[in-house]
Amino acid sequence: MAAVGLNYQGELRDFIAQHVDLLDYVELVPDIAWTDRGPEATDRYVDDRATVAFIEQVADAVPIVAHSIGLSIASAHRFRTEHVDQIRRWDERFDFAWHSDHLGYNVVADPERPGAEFTVGVPLPLPLDDDVLDLVVERAIHVQQAVAKRFLLENNSAYVRVPGDRYRWAQFLNLLCARSGCGLLLDLHNLYVDGRNCTEDVDAFLAELDLDNVVEIHLAGGLTYGDHYLDAHSGGVPDDVWKLAADVIPACPALRGVTFELLGSWFGRFGEAALLDTIAGMRELVG
Amino acid sequence: MSAAPKLADLAALQSACASVVSDAPGPGAVSGHRLHQLDDVRADPGLDVVKMLYRSWRLTKVLSLLPLTTAAIPTDELTGLLGEFWQRRKAVGPYFVEECLAFLDFLTTSGVERSARLVDLAAFERARLELHDEIAAGAQRADRDVVLRHRPSELFSTDAAETCEPADSPSTLRGSVDEQGTERWVVTSGPDDGLSLRVGRPAH
């Protein structure tokens, strides 16, 4: 039976503290619990004391799962090995149940300043070709050798698909998992977003995806922006995503957890009762 | 083609995509089929969404941690200033504090004519960011003195804020934060000497 988890956000501290008995794990974006002061700093990664103290308290009650945003695993200009080392140190400290990051990139070389890099904070268009596949496979293997826990990569939403891809999205994910041994964090809301924005055929994707690789599932809510629908983590799980989850979860034999993601700034509007209902709905789904 | 040139081509495409999204100068040395891919990305209607998400990401940082400073700048002017700031300084990480301190530096050095009130509010919010940053990094207690041209009792008052004028003599406001993150602000010199202030703190 898969476990049920909730993402950590500062605004959710009281909720998590009060209802931790309803959760099997808490998922932490570790990058928000430290500040990376850059390669020149003596103490490069500085803990955020309040967040770390809370996570230590939660870790006494339930396991912590790391869901990082800082690896930028598909960045072609360099591999952020310092980030992998930091995840390894934090795994030694918090004994993560498993850890994950996003299949994509947001850190790039700065063409105006040789040797420097910059970030745009959002996933950028990713060509699905052999150059990217080889790059990500090699790095996913490195991560698994460096951190002694199951490592997953998440399917980002794609607001822009790069034309001329050699692989379909599900095909790319299957090859990545098969060649590297990493698992898949299947974000069903991201997939729903892709379906709504017509960058992916959801049924065809799921028919092709090897669900044996799925170790974790993400659920979330979003909002519309003009003609597009966004993965905003802004509220309740859409009915269609609940239906997808009900279909997919029983078909994932290696599934360990289903996580609800909510942005802290939306918690007030979403409300405690709705969050409790969502957790209950997830519990029902996993049986 | 060996792996290195292929990766160089891919890295060039990635830098160009990031430059397009952030409206930075570019596109750099993209060629061959990667250039065709870049052209297609540029023409994709989804690109506007990615650009909006990027701008929102950077805007959120500044609005959430510098509410007093940003509220003291007319919206049109703030939009222009932020656009210029983002052009000059690409984001180097996900963190809010370093971006906000850089924006305050930009306000100081950009040559924009700033009101005395804006100067005071920016100085106050800089001190506040530095105080909390010091505590977050492990200090037991942090203190800062901020010299203000306005009377603090007027500067932070929602009633008088828009119309308050610089005082005849400056004030020194001492801020301290303890390890629980509790702030204290006390006027240590000037016309409001001895006054304790509570200034609403942005949630972050």
Image: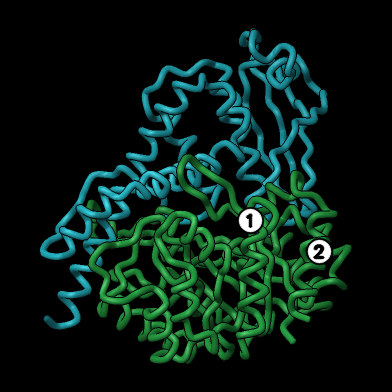
Residue where numbered disc 1 is placed: A221
Nearest to the observer: residue B87 or residue A89: B87
At mark 1, the secondary structure is loop
Residue shown at 66%/76% (left/top)?
A65
Q: Are marks 2 and 1 on the same chain?
A: yes
- Determine whether B85 is above or below B20 in the image: above
Total numbered labels: 2
Quadrant assignment for the N terminus of chain B: bottom left
Identified by mark 1, the residue type is: Gly
Res A87 label:
none
Between the residue at mark 2 and the residue at mark 1, the CA separation in whole angstroms equals: 19 Å
Q: Colour of chain A?
A: green
Where residue A246 appears, as percent x and y from the top left, is 67, 74
Residue shown at 62%/38% (left/top)?
B127
Instruction: Tell me the quarter of the picture where residue A26 sits.
Output: bottom right
- Determine whether A198 is above or below B22 in the image: below
From the viewer's perspective, is the residue at label 2 or at label 1 nearer? 1
Q: Colour of chain B?
A: cyan
Crowding at dot 2, Cα within 10 Å, few <14 / some 14-19 / many 20+, comes out as many
Nearest to the observer: residue A66 or residue B196: A66
Nearest to the observer: residue A188 or residue A26: A188
Crowding at dot 1, Cα within 10 Å, few <14 / some 14-19 / many 20+, comes out as many
Nearest to the observer: residue B189 or residue A230: A230
Identified by mark 2, the residue type is: Ile
Instruction: Tell me the quarter of the picture where residue A106 sits.
Output: bottom left
Q: Chain of mark 2?
A: A
Residue shown at 68%/52% (left/top)?
A235
- Determine whether B164 is above or below A125 in the image: above
Residue where numbered disc 2 is placed: A16
At mark 2, the secondary structure is helix
- Determine whether A198 is above or below A173 in the image: above
